[in-house]
Amino acid sequence: MPPEPSLQSPAAQKSPRAARTPLNSLSTRIILCVFGSTLLTALIVSWMSISTIHEDLRNRLATRNEGLLSERTHQIEVWHGVASNELETALSPGHPWHRALLDALDTQTAPSDWHWLSGLNTAPPFPETRNALPTPPTEVSRHFDRLALTRAGAAPAPEPGCLTVRSDVARSDQSIAGSIVGCLSHSTLYEALRPPSPDVRGLRTLVVDESGRITAAVGIRAATRIGNRLPLENLRAASEERLVSYDGSQDTHQLSTLAPVGLTGWFLAVEADHAQDFAPATKITKQIFVIDVCIILIFSVLAYKITLAIMQPIEALSRGARRISEGHIDYEIPEPTRDDELALLTRTFNDMMRKMRSNQLEIESDRVRLAEKNEELQRANEILSQLSITDGLTKLHNHRYFQDHLTREIKRVGRSTSPLSMILLDIDDFKLLNDTHGHAAGDEVLVSLAAIMSDSARESDLIARYGGEEFVILMPNTDLAGAVHLAEKIRMSVESTRLIIGSGMKPIEITISLGVALFHGNRREFFAEADGALYEAKAAGKNCVIIASSDGTLPG
């Protein structure tokens, strides 16, 4: 009986676990859709809120820094102007210090171009000349840490890290006798940089020279910034931004606002740590993040609850459909107690399955009967097919099958050029044997001869009853010598066999005549050569093997 056909659908047979994949679940898709929508909305709102908060905070910080810079810059410019005026006043003609400087310029013979004046707040770099030049008046010295005097045309004095004031020393004829360069007092500068109120103590106020080097700093961790450089090119390139970020000392992210100090070429900067200034925004960002997470979780739980209430009946229907696709047609889905669309669908499904079971039983009964009839028909067809190609007496292949097989072998020889040989044989004096012993004895002789040929030939050789007492053997991949060898073997086996026929128990002897031919490309000539060789064997006295010549004529 053939195997029972599967009741699964092609999609279920191809992927039986497809419906069980979590991402393919409708409930999962609904929850993911709600989760994604909530997440996207929360991210957009959060991004807009955080961007607005950061922008507002940057504006507030920029406004604060700009106010502080404006105030500090104004104080330094005023102080720079006062120091310049005091120095110009002390160098006016008729001032005692002016006359002393002219005398020093006329009499000084020291090898250095620059000479540091005495009486200042800090020691100059050349202490050996400290008391060699006139002491400046108090109204001048109070503004400067160092003052240097030089003749006209000398190279500039060494002024590292100083905010300087320069003034010429003129003679009565208005010619320039020399110059004085003053380094403004660092103590006064630091006092001008100090924050005016505790509200800005978290900042650093920096004094920056033309090269970007920080020469003075006041505020939190100010000492770590002195000697470092600000990225002036980046700050100037971003001048349209009121607040510029960059990496400061020790890889700390900084925020800065920059302003020039008058016409000195120096800059004043207000700097703060990014984390410190944006701490309020960071706190608000964390709060927004926590709120977003809570909203997402709440909406996800609600979506899960709603989806679960919808999906439970659908999953029951899905399980029932899967069980039925696996062949469990007696399965019924538990019907829900509520009266809604899903309950109606469940009842309709169960009714459909009851009708399907009834139809399935009828189909199965008809299928069994049809299978039995098919088996009977198949057996009958096999018997008929075998009978159509088999000789009923000898059980060898018949003339029809031989002709079909010969056609196939000739085609194969045409492709492979391998040899093909044929033996055509006939029982000698078979009519006399029938007349003497009867047709039943003749049939026994035919059966015995068929057995001898089957034992002598190879499995690849085809033995067929060509008609009456005449037989043919077709030998693929066999040359003429091999065919003659087999013919002699069969002839000798038949000659040496004593047959007991009928009830008389008397042995009889039979002989056969055989004609052998080799295929040369023509089917008609192939069989004619074998047939001619057979008749030649009969004419030669029987019980012999005759070979057809290669030119289609019998050997003489």
Image: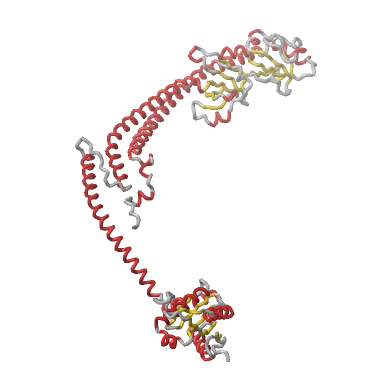
Q: Quadrant location of residue 27?
A: top left
The type of colouring in the image is secondary structure
Query: Which quarter of the picture shows residue 435?
Result: bottom left
Which residue is found at the position 47% from the left and 22% from the top? 278
Residue 151: % across, % down: 74, 19
**Residue 533 locus on image (x, y percent):** 52, 87
Q: Image check: 303 left or right of 196?
A: left
Q: Which residue lies furthest to the top in this view?
A: 138
Furthest residue toward left: 339
| Quadrant in which the C terminus appears | bottom right
Q: In this view, does 383 lie to the left or right of 351?
A: right
Which is nearer the eye, 426 or 113?
A: 426
Q: In this view, does 387 lie to the left or right of 278?
A: left
Nearest the viewer among 62 and 126 is 62
Residue sitting at x 30%, y 35%: 307
Q: In this view, does 263 lie above or below 123?
A: below
Q: Is residue 308 above or below residue 540?
A: above
Depth check, front residue: 479 or 161: 479
Residue shown at the point (73%, 21%) measured from the top left: 152
Residue 325, position as x, y percentages in the image: 31, 48
Q: Left or right of 81: which side holds 364? A: left
Tag count: 0
Location of the N terminus (image quadrant): bottom left
When the figure is inspected, residue 41 is found, relative to residue 182, above or below; the finding is below
* Viewer-closest of 276 and 498: 498
Establish if 506 lies above or below 65: below
Query: Where does the image place residue 61, in percent across and percent down from the top left?
Result: 47, 21
